Image (cartoon, coloured by chain):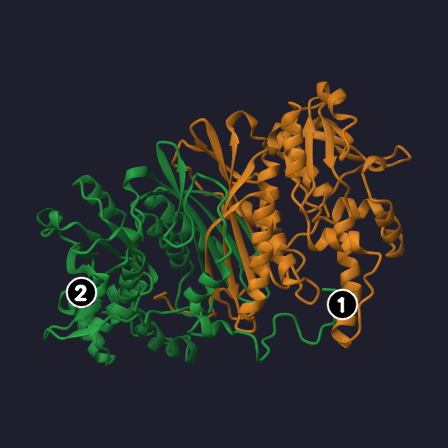
Chain colours: A green, B orange
Amino acid sequence: MYEKKDKKPGEIKPKLTSLAELGEFGLIDRLTRDVKYYHPETLRGIGDDAAVIDAGAKVLLLSTDLLVEGIHFNLTYMPFKHLGYKAAVVNISDIAAMNGIPRQMTVSLAVSSRFSAEALDELYAGIIMACDKYKVDLVGGDTSSNVKGMMISVSIIGEAKKEEVTYRSGARSGDLLCVTGDLGSAYLGLLILEREKSVFQIDPEMQPELTGFEYQIGRQLRPEARTDIRNLLVGIGIKPTAMIDISDGLASETLHICKQSGVGCKLFEGKIPIDPYTRELAKEFKIIPSVAALSGGEDYELLFTVNQGDYEKIKDIAGITIIGHMTAASEGKYLITPDGISVPLTAQGWDGMKSK
Amino acid sequence: MYEKKDKKPGEIKPKLTSLAELGEFGLIDRLTRDVKYYHPETLRGIGDDAAVIDAGAKVLLLSTDLLVEGIHFNLTYMPFKHLGYKAAVVNISDIAAMNGIPRQMTVSLAVSSRFSAEALDELYAGIIMACDKYKVDLVGGDTSSNVKGMMISVSIIGEAKKEEVTYRSGARSGDLLCVTGDLGSAYLGLLILEREKSVFQIDPEMQPELTGFEYQIGRQLRPEARTDIRNLLVGIGIKPTAMIDISDGLASETLHICKQSGVGCKLFEGKIPIDPYTRELAKEFKIIPSVAALSGGEDYELLFTVNQGDYEKIKDIAGITIIGHMTAASEGKYLITPDGISVPLTAQGWDGMKSK
């Protein structure tokens, strides 16, 4: 700071690297390349849904997520209570994706003076509702003014038995690729809300037309974490070989598992579970339904791989769909269309850095 | 959201409560009044420097802090590396204040596109430098775009032996009130930086006049956490009865201990440790030096109470000053001036919510 300055702090000069060039994952890789671990109990650091910390008989899982107004949520159509609920759930989902149980949470909030205490009461009512449903203790946080807008940062601690923890890196060639619930509806919900947003803005007395879209809007505004499926799998003695939650879209998350496990995949487009009405709606928006599932994101379903030997156990479970299998890395990563054509699987998931 | 709307979301209407009315602590009390704890291992939730989670032989400490551009830091004079260092240190300080050892950290970052990857490299270099000094594993985080400005949210896990954890609530009447290091310099550093800021802004080629103020500026831009004193106390077998770190100012933190311990205090103004040159500088800024210490904040020194029986052990330790003692709650909370006059101790510490 004692040097001559010929630019404002942080301003981009031609020779500097813009964040858009790197994208979120490129930026994280770059910023954390010099990170060292000092403690033997840090079993896994950066690079999975949660960090894994040895605690004797069990492990602790630590994860954090940030929600920024205007980037991750739009208060024009996002009620505060839903926002609070979702902020908690996306973190709980990270713990489920490690095959763990959520335990404690902290919530930090930066808010501009345009917000009232009553609005924040609603936000916290949503957070507390999620904590009650998923039995999470809200144990701390921080509250600050913000120059503009609202930002919510949630950190969560979960726990798991050491042998139960599921990493992104455990998938092997031949494993079945499975997904919970159905995909793409959260994205359609977002499209409907964006379409009706103009109604909110132009005439506040007008009612936006949301009837009939409750499922899709609910999936967008009030997602759930699939702790139920995680518990079901533990109950029937299936340990996924790899697992991740779907926040960025099926394609992006499948590629994360492939990359970190060093395997390829065949993902059958026709097997992707999509709600029938979401399928109809997608066509109305001139979107191929499977693209909404592959690239839409925010479904917070679990994507996981299991050993082929678990096929009989898993094939008839309601709420789980086998959508493909893992292959040797040399065989590549492919989406197989219903016509049997193989196309390379690419991620066009939402990327917070590139989209701005 | 399906109701008729006659206002923008979150906008303050006359009957609603503004955040400024409540202040940060009032807001936190209000938002967390309905929080329930479900898990027996949650030994302490909201209300101390960190939450305390039972982990068998030891406990885990969990804390989180938020730094917002324009509220907590000003990039006109805050170099990115210092900012990263400080963001880590203020969290490490929270763990020290619980009498614990920092272990793992997550860092979440929201940044607008005005920042370059090189600026964030510097920020992370500062974070990693602090992690190296204090031996903390950086195990995760989240990265997002921001509409405007920069926001850093850090969460930290520490550990302690169960019997070593020090709460704000353990002070008893008769205990000695002690503080580490010296106070008020960080605030003077801020005043100098604010004074010279115009130089940065008016003529970027001009050098601001910072020579001679290195100590104060260093205290503001690059504070340290007093893990050294925490370790020293453990080494000589002193367990503070209560402890807190000084982020908001000596007065505010002393009152936190009084409130949570249910005691009063006598704090001797003349005993407050203040650097001699900071004392001079304060006068130059027409500030009573003790006021800088009592209300300035950001010193990140430790304020703690010890049993009177520990007096002999503690009285000659360099870097620790006894500044008063705790009394029965009925005796009130007083500052005793060098003339022997008792004035009620009041907090005018920095309050993120009220200052905007």
Would residue A68 be found to the left or right of residue B316 on screen?
left
In terms of depth relative to the viewer, which is nearer, B320 or A142? B320
Instruction: Tell me the SS state at disc 1.
Output: helix
Residue at 15% in and 57% down:
A321
Residue B217 placement: quadrant = bottom right
Would residue B182 be found to the left or right of residue B161 on screen?
right
Residue at 53% in and 62% down:
A115
- Label 2 is placed on what type of residue? Lys
Residue B227 placement: quadrant = top right
How dense is the environment of label 2, judged by Cα within 10 Å: few (below 14), some, or many (20 and up)?
many
Which percent across, then down, holds residue A229? 22, 48
How dense is the environment of label 1, judged by Cα within 10 Å: few (below 14), some, or many (20 and up)?
some
- The mark lying in front, picked from 1 and 2, is 2
In terms of depth relative to the viewer, which is nearer, A81 or B250? B250
Which percent across, then down, holds residue B162? 51, 27
Please state, as top left, top right, bottom left or bottom right, where the N terminus of chain B lies in the image: bottom left
Residue at 53% in and 55% down:
B153
The chain ID associated with circle 2 is A
- Label 1 is placed on what type of residue? Lys
Residue at 64% in and 64% down:
B70
Instruction: Tell me the SS state at disc 2.
Output: strand
Do badges 1 and 2 share one subunit?
no
Q: Which mark is residue B197?
A: 1
For disc 2, the marked residue is A266
In terms of depth relative to the viewer, which is nearer, B140 or B15? B140
* Tag 1 and tag 2, C-beta contact below 8 Å: no
